[in-house]
Image: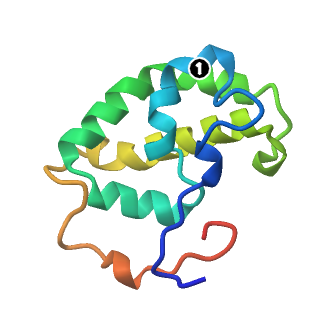
Amino acid sequence: MNMSTIRFHPAAQKDDGPLLPTAFAEFEPLVAEWALPNERARAYKRIETPIEKLHAFHAATVGRLEEILDYFNTFPNDPAALPPDAKRLYQLTQMVMEASAPIDLQWPTPDIEDVFPMDRVRFHPPGI
């Protein structure tokens, strides 16, 4: 796989089961764009998304994080073992965390100029 290619999760499309757990169905419209399969895709999504859009995504999801975490506490601590609907919720939640950095730090943009350049960051398993 070319390391500069971001592959979006094919499971973002509806499979045999629900897209997300029923309690979190309100987030289904966000899955295709925001439930990304790995750290690399999430990092690039954050820096390539306008800050206003990150704010909107964050505002739409962050209020339910405690409930989402309570839900995940009903599973063993192994993200790879999650059923597909829960896995997509997990990926969506990881993106909320990624989007939180510039929001919580009140950056005017999704990335700042004086940091290590993203194109020089190497992602290693399992984060790739």
The kind of residue tagged 1 is Phe
Please identify the quarter of the rendering in which residue 118 is found.
bottom left
Q: Where 72 sits versus 105, above or below?
A: above
Q: Which of 24 and 94 lies nearest the eye of the viewer?
A: 24
Q: Residues within 10 Å of mark 1 (few under 14, many from 20)?
A: some
| Residue annotated with mark 1 | 24
Residue at 26% from the left image edge and 36% from the top image edge: 55
Residue at 45% from the left image edge and 80% from the top image edge: 4
Q: Where 90 sits versus 126, above or below?
A: above
SS at mark 1?
Answer: helix
Q: Residue furthest top?
A: 23
Drawn side of residue 71 relative to residue 101, left or right: right
Q: Residue furthest left?
A: 108
Residue at 48% from the left image edge and 62% from the top image edge: 41
Drawn side of residue 70 relative to residue 52, left or right: right
Residue at 53% from the left image edge and 52% from the top image edge: 36
From the image, which quarter does the C terminus lie in?
Answer: bottom right
Drawn side of residue 74 relative to residue 12, left or right: right
- Please name the colour scheme applied to the rendered image: rainbow
Q: Which of 105 and 52 lies nearest the eye of the viewer?
A: 52
Q: Where 84 sits versus 50, above or below?
A: above
From the image, which quarter does the N terminus lie in?
Answer: bottom right
Q: Where 41 sits versus 77, above or below?
A: below
Q: Which of 68 and 56 lies nearest the eye of the viewer?
A: 56
Drawn side of residue 110 relative to residue 24, left or right: left
Please identify the quarter of the rendering in which residue 33 is found.
top left
Residue 72 lies, in percent from the top left, at 72, 30
Residue 78 lies, in percent from the top left, at 81, 47
Residue 27 lies, in percent from the top left, at 50, 25
